[in-house]
Image (spheres, coloured by chain):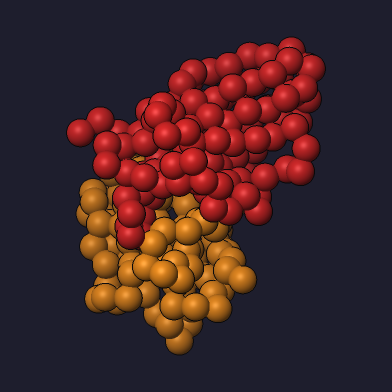
Chain colours: A orange, B red
Amino acid sequence: AQSVTQLDSHVSVSEGTPVLLRCNYSSSYSPSLFWYVQHPNKGLQLLLKYTSAATLVKGINGFEAEFKKSETSFHLTKPSAHMSDAAEYFCVVSEPRDGSARQLTFGSGTQLTVLP
Amino acid sequence: NAGVMQNPRHLVRRRGQEARLRCSPMKGHSHVYWYRQLPEEGLKFMVYLQKENIIDESGMPKERFSAEFPKEGPSILRIQQVVRGDSAAYFCASSPLGGSEQYFGPGTRLTVT
Protein backbone atom coordinates (compact mmCIF):
# COMPACT_ATOMS: atom_id res chain seq x y z
CA ALA A 1 0.00 0.00 0.00
CA GLN A 2 1.13 3.52 -0.72
CA SER A 3 0.95 6.55 1.55
CA VAL A 4 2.26 10.07 1.76
CA THR A 5 3.04 12.24 4.77
CA GLN A 6 3.49 15.97 4.42
CA LEU A 7 5.31 17.00 7.55
CA ASP A 8 4.08 20.59 7.74
CA SER A 9 0.49 21.70 7.32
CA HIS A 10 1.53 25.37 7.11
CA VAL A 11 4.80 27.00 6.02
CA SER A 12 5.41 30.72 6.07
CA VAL A 13 8.38 32.39 4.36
CA SER A 14 9.37 35.91 3.40
CA GLU A 15 9.48 36.90 -0.23
CA GLY A 16 12.92 36.22 -1.68
CA THR A 17 13.87 33.55 0.88
CA PRO A 18 14.12 29.79 0.20
CA VAL A 19 11.13 27.45 0.32
CA LEU A 20 11.25 23.90 1.71
CA LEU A 21 8.12 21.74 1.75
CA ARG A 22 8.72 18.29 3.22
CA CYS A 23 7.26 15.01 2.06
CA ASN A 24 7.85 11.38 3.05
CA TYR A 25 6.31 8.45 1.22
CA SER A 26 5.70 4.77 1.68
CA SER A 27 5.37 2.39 -1.26
CA SER A 28 5.56 -1.33 -1.93
CA TYR A 29 6.72 -0.77 -5.50
CA SER A 30 9.01 1.66 -7.27
CA PRO A 31 6.74 4.67 -7.07
CA SER A 32 6.13 7.67 -9.22
CA LEU A 33 6.09 10.86 -7.17
CA PHE A 34 4.55 14.21 -7.98
CA TRP A 35 4.06 17.66 -6.57
CA TYR A 36 0.86 19.51 -7.45
CA VAL A 37 -0.09 23.08 -6.58
CA GLN A 38 -3.60 24.34 -5.96
CA HIS A 39 -4.43 28.02 -5.90
CA PRO A 40 -7.63 29.09 -4.08
CA ASN A 41 -10.78 27.79 -5.78
CA LYS A 42 -8.75 26.50 -8.69
CA GLY A 43 -7.84 23.08 -10.03
CA LEU A 44 -4.52 21.34 -9.53
CA GLN A 45 -1.46 22.07 -11.60
CA LEU A 46 1.41 19.62 -11.94
CA LEU A 47 4.66 21.18 -10.74
CA LEU A 48 7.00 18.25 -11.34
CA LYS A 49 7.22 14.48 -11.37
CA TYR A 50 9.71 11.73 -10.58
CA THR A 51 9.46 8.45 -12.48
CA SER A 52 12.74 6.58 -11.77
CA ALA A 53 14.97 8.71 -13.96
CA ALA A 54 17.20 11.48 -12.48
CA THR A 55 16.75 11.83 -8.74
CA LEU A 56 16.83 15.64 -8.90
CA VAL A 57 13.75 16.78 -10.74
CA LYS A 58 13.23 20.29 -12.04
CA GLY A 59 9.73 21.63 -12.43
CA ILE A 60 7.92 24.77 -13.43
CA ASN A 61 8.24 28.18 -11.78
CA GLY A 62 11.71 27.44 -10.38
CA PHE A 63 10.66 24.54 -8.17
CA GLU A 64 12.65 21.34 -7.85
CA ALA A 65 12.54 18.17 -5.77
CA GLU A 66 15.03 15.48 -4.88
CA PHE A 67 14.08 11.81 -4.62
CA LYS A 68 16.00 10.15 -1.75
CA LYS A 69 15.21 6.46 -1.60
CA SER A 70 17.23 5.86 1.58
CA GLU A 71 15.19 8.50 3.39
CA THR A 72 11.93 7.81 1.50
CA SER A 73 11.66 11.54 0.98
CA PHE A 74 10.70 13.82 -1.88
CA HIS A 75 11.05 17.36 -0.54
CA LEU A 76 10.09 20.36 -2.68
CA THR A 77 12.39 23.39 -2.77
CA LYS A 78 12.69 26.78 -4.42
CA PRO A 79 15.65 29.13 -3.92
CA SER A 80 13.64 32.33 -3.75
CA ALA A 81 9.93 32.63 -2.93
CA HIS A 82 7.62 34.89 -4.89
CA MET A 83 4.30 36.27 -3.73
CA SER A 84 2.56 34.29 -6.47
CA ASP A 85 3.82 31.03 -4.91
CA ALA A 86 1.31 31.34 -2.07
CA ALA A 87 -0.94 28.30 -2.49
CA GLU A 88 -1.59 24.77 -1.24
CA TYR A 89 0.95 22.16 -2.28
CA PHE A 90 0.28 18.44 -2.45
CA CYS A 91 2.82 15.63 -2.52
CA VAL A 92 1.43 12.65 -4.42
CA VAL A 93 2.49 9.03 -4.91
CA SER A 94 1.42 6.55 -7.54
CA GLU A 95 2.32 2.90 -8.01
CA PRO A 96 1.94 2.17 -11.69
CA ARG A 97 2.25 -1.57 -12.11
CA ASP A 98 2.02 -1.81 -15.85
CA GLY A 99 3.53 1.54 -16.79
CA SER A 100 0.22 3.34 -16.81
CA ALA A 101 -1.22 5.80 -14.33
CA ARG A 102 -3.23 4.38 -11.49
CA GLN A 103 -4.89 5.96 -8.54
CA LEU A 104 -2.95 8.79 -6.98
CA THR A 105 -2.57 9.01 -3.22
CA PHE A 106 -2.42 12.58 -1.97
CA GLY A 107 -0.78 13.99 1.11
CA SER A 108 -2.86 16.23 3.32
CA GLY A 109 -1.31 19.35 1.82
CA THR A 110 0.96 22.18 2.92
CA GLN A 111 -0.36 25.72 2.84
CA LEU A 112 2.46 28.07 1.81
CA THR A 113 2.20 31.71 2.87
CA VAL A 114 4.63 34.24 1.40
CA LEU A 115 5.12 37.40 3.44
CA PRO A 116 6.11 40.69 1.78
CA ASN B 1 -5.25 21.58 -26.89
CA ALA B 2 -8.04 22.18 -24.42
CA GLY B 3 -7.47 20.87 -20.93
CA VAL B 4 -9.76 18.70 -18.87
CA MET B 5 -13.21 20.26 -18.77
CA GLN B 6 -15.67 19.89 -15.95
CA ASN B 7 -19.17 21.22 -15.62
CA PRO B 8 -20.87 22.65 -13.86
CA ARG B 9 -18.23 24.50 -11.84
CA HIS B 10 -20.64 25.04 -8.99
CA LEU B 11 -23.70 22.95 -8.19
CA VAL B 12 -26.21 23.46 -5.41
CA ARG B 13 -28.60 20.67 -4.52
CA ARG B 14 -31.11 20.18 -1.72
CA ARG B 15 -30.92 17.05 0.39
CA GLY B 16 -32.46 14.10 -1.42
CA GLN B 17 -31.88 15.43 -4.94
CA GLU B 18 -29.55 13.96 -7.52
CA ALA B 19 -26.25 15.51 -8.60
CA ARG B 20 -24.66 14.86 -11.99
CA LEU B 21 -21.09 15.97 -12.57
CA ARG B 22 -19.55 15.89 -16.03
CA CYS B 23 -15.96 15.53 -17.15
CA SER B 24 -14.50 15.73 -20.64
CA PRO B 25 -10.91 14.45 -20.75
CA MET B 26 -8.11 16.05 -22.69
CA LYS B 27 -8.06 15.22 -26.37
CA GLY B 28 -6.41 11.88 -26.92
CA HIS B 29 -6.76 10.75 -23.31
CA SER B 30 -8.59 7.50 -22.75
CA HIS B 31 -8.42 7.25 -18.95
CA VAL B 32 -10.53 9.23 -16.50
CA TYR B 33 -10.24 9.46 -12.72
CA TRP B 34 -12.54 11.04 -10.15
CA TYR B 35 -11.35 12.44 -6.82
CA ARG B 36 -13.15 14.11 -3.94
CA GLN B 37 -11.72 16.87 -1.80
CA LEU B 38 -13.41 17.56 1.50
CA PRO B 39 -12.76 20.92 3.20
CA GLU B 40 -9.24 21.22 4.63
CA GLU B 41 -8.23 17.81 3.23
CA GLY B 42 -6.28 16.40 0.33
CA LEU B 43 -7.90 14.69 -2.60
CA LYS B 44 -9.17 11.13 -2.17
CA PHE B 45 -9.37 8.71 -5.10
CA MET B 46 -12.85 7.54 -5.99
CA VAL B 47 -12.87 5.71 -9.33
CA TYR B 48 -10.80 5.04 -12.46
CA LEU B 49 -12.48 4.45 -15.79
CA GLN B 50 -11.66 3.76 -19.40
CA LYS B 51 -14.21 4.00 -22.19
CA GLU B 52 -17.16 1.77 -21.24
CA ASN B 53 -15.18 0.13 -18.42
CA ILE B 54 -14.77 0.72 -14.71
CA ILE B 55 -11.20 -0.31 -13.92
CA ASP B 56 -10.96 0.52 -10.21
CA GLU B 57 -13.80 1.75 -8.01
CA SER B 58 -12.19 0.97 -4.69
CA GLY B 59 -12.66 4.56 -3.46
CA MET B 60 -16.33 4.88 -4.29
CA PRO B 61 -18.89 4.86 -1.47
CA LYS B 62 -20.91 1.67 -1.66
CA GLU B 63 -24.28 3.41 -1.99
CA ARG B 64 -25.68 6.35 -3.93
CA PHE B 65 -22.53 6.96 -6.01
CA SER B 66 -21.96 5.72 -9.56
CA ALA B 67 -19.72 6.64 -12.46
CA GLU B 68 -19.65 5.95 -16.16
CA PHE B 69 -17.54 6.81 -19.17
CA PRO B 70 -19.58 5.99 -22.26
CA LYS B 71 -18.24 5.37 -25.73
CA GLU B 72 -19.44 8.81 -26.76
CA GLY B 73 -19.63 11.86 -24.51
CA PRO B 74 -18.21 12.88 -21.17
CA SER B 75 -17.68 10.86 -18.05
CA ILE B 76 -20.47 11.28 -15.51
CA LEU B 77 -20.26 11.04 -11.73
CA ARG B 78 -23.75 10.59 -10.33
CA ILE B 79 -24.73 11.04 -6.71
CA GLN B 80 -28.26 10.03 -5.80
CA GLN B 81 -30.19 11.33 -2.78
CA VAL B 82 -27.45 13.75 -1.78
CA VAL B 83 -26.75 14.45 1.88
CA ARG B 84 -24.91 17.35 3.55
CA GLY B 85 -21.77 15.23 3.86
CA ASP B 86 -21.53 15.02 0.07
CA SER B 87 -20.64 18.73 -0.05
CA ALA B 88 -17.12 18.82 -1.46
CA ALA B 89 -15.06 19.66 -4.50
CA TYR B 90 -15.04 16.85 -7.06
CA PHE B 91 -12.10 16.75 -9.41
CA CYS B 92 -11.71 14.82 -12.61
CA ALA B 93 -8.35 13.95 -14.13
CA SER B 94 -7.33 12.27 -17.35
CA SER B 95 -4.27 10.54 -18.70
CA PRO B 96 -3.27 9.04 -22.04
CA LEU B 97 -2.85 5.31 -22.50
CA GLY B 98 0.45 4.38 -20.83
CA GLY B 99 0.88 7.82 -19.26
CA SER B 100 2.12 8.10 -15.69
CA GLU B 101 0.75 11.54 -14.87
CA GLN B 102 -2.76 12.84 -14.56
CA TYR B 103 -4.07 16.22 -15.69
CA PHE B 104 -6.76 17.75 -13.56
CA GLY B 105 -9.84 19.75 -14.40
CA PRO B 106 -10.94 22.83 -12.45
CA GLY B 107 -13.34 20.84 -10.29
CA THR B 108 -17.04 20.97 -9.49
CA ARG B 109 -17.94 22.40 -6.11
CA LEU B 110 -21.06 20.70 -4.82
CA THR B 111 -23.02 22.29 -2.03
CA VAL B 112 -25.88 20.39 -0.44
CA THR B 113 -28.35 22.54 1.45
In percent of width and height, residue A88 lies at 47, 44
The N terminus of chain A, quarter of image: bottom right
In the image, residue B108 sits, relative to residue A100, either above or below, namely above
Residue at figure coordinates x 53%, y 71% from the top left: A25
Where does the image place residue A17, in percent across and percent down from the top left?
31, 55
Is residue A22 something one can see in this rendering? no
Seen from the viewer's position, the closer of residues A4 and B4 is: B4
Dividing the picture into quadrants, the one containing residue A77 is bottom left
Q: Is residue A109 above or below residue B109?
A: below
Check the image and name the residue furthest to the left.
B1
Can you give x and y, in whole percent of width and height, for residue B69 in the image?
49, 36
Q: Taking A70 as reference, is B4 left or right?
A: left
Residue B101 quadrant? bottom left
Q: Residue at x 27, y 36 (%)?
A: B27
B76 relative to A38, above or below:
above
Identify whether A32 is placed above or below A45: below
- Give whichever of B94, B91 is nearer the camera: B94
The residue shown at (25%, 57%) is A59
Quadrant (top left/top right/bottom left/bottom right) for the C terminus of chain A: top left
Residue B16 in view (yes/no): yes
Residue visible at 61% across and 46% down in the picture: B46
Q: How many marks?
A: 0
**Residue B31 appears left or right of B65:** left
Which residue is more in the foreground, A60 or B83?
A: B83
